[in-house]
Image (cartoon, rainbow, N blue to C red):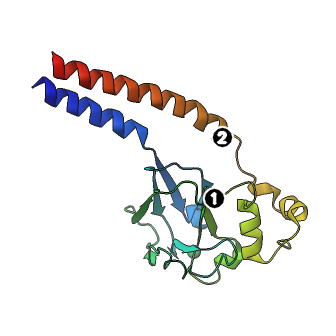
Amino acid sequence: MRFFVAIALFASFTAVLAEQFTVIVGKDNGLAYDPPFVTAKNGDVVAFQFVSKNHTVTQSTFANPCQRMTTPTQGVDSGYMPVAAGATAFPQWSITINNASNPLWFYCAQQPHCTRGMVFAINPTADKTFDQFKAAATGGAATGSAATGSATSAGTSPSASAPAGNSASSIDRSAVSVLACITLALAMFL
Ligand SMILES: [Cu+2]
């Protein structure tokens, strides 16, 4: 009995370790993902909720934001998710992160949404930023000039909360893991 309680406890601790991000697709009938990018770790789930029009979440590459990735593997794709005006139930599609050190790039395959800036990223880096990716999609700034790129798209600057919050919560998480293991060990001996 105690063993099963311990298992249940451990399972709930593990659930705390993985986060789920919810990304709203087409909020307020806009051609955008909200938020436009997330910083996720292995095991995290990014869930897209489609709330208007007929959008997709389609994987591309940093170099070609508006084309589906073909190598080394075919990019993932939600397919078209039509939503009737006035709908109250919304389709959802999600992906689980299994290699957080590898940035992932996405766009909406509905024309001409991508070239109007409907792009999304998971784990963009200092070298490959979301702003650069979006600029490449819209044909706005030259990819070679990061300075002009960020100046013209300052409105989409990332919020500063991610890095600090992440490191703080990963410390919490390791503490929680240790607690969970101790609980499990105790429960098995009692
Ligand atoms: Cu779209």
- Please say if 37 is above or below 91: above
Q: Earlier in the sequence, mark 2 or mark 1?
A: 1
* Residue 18, percent from left and from top: 42, 43
Q: Name the residue under label 1.
A: 36
Considering every residue shown, the one lying at the far top of the view is 190
Asked if the residue under mark 1 is in contact with the one under mark 2, i.e. CB atoms within 8 Å, the reply is no
Q: Which residue is drawn at 70% across and 78% down?
A: 115
The answer to which quarter of the image holds residue 78 is bottom left
Mark 2 or mark 1: which is in front?
2
* Residue 150, percent from left and from top: 84, 59
> What kind of element bears circle 2?
helix
The answer to which quarter of the image holds residue 166 is top right
Three-letter residue code for mark 1: Pro
Does the beta carbon of the residue at mark 1 sit less than 8 Å from ligand 1?
Answer: no
Q: Which residue is drawn at 43% across and 61% down?
A: 95
Image mark for residue 163: 2
Can residue 122 be seen at all in this image of the molecule? Answer: yes
- Camera-nearest residue between 41 and 37: 41
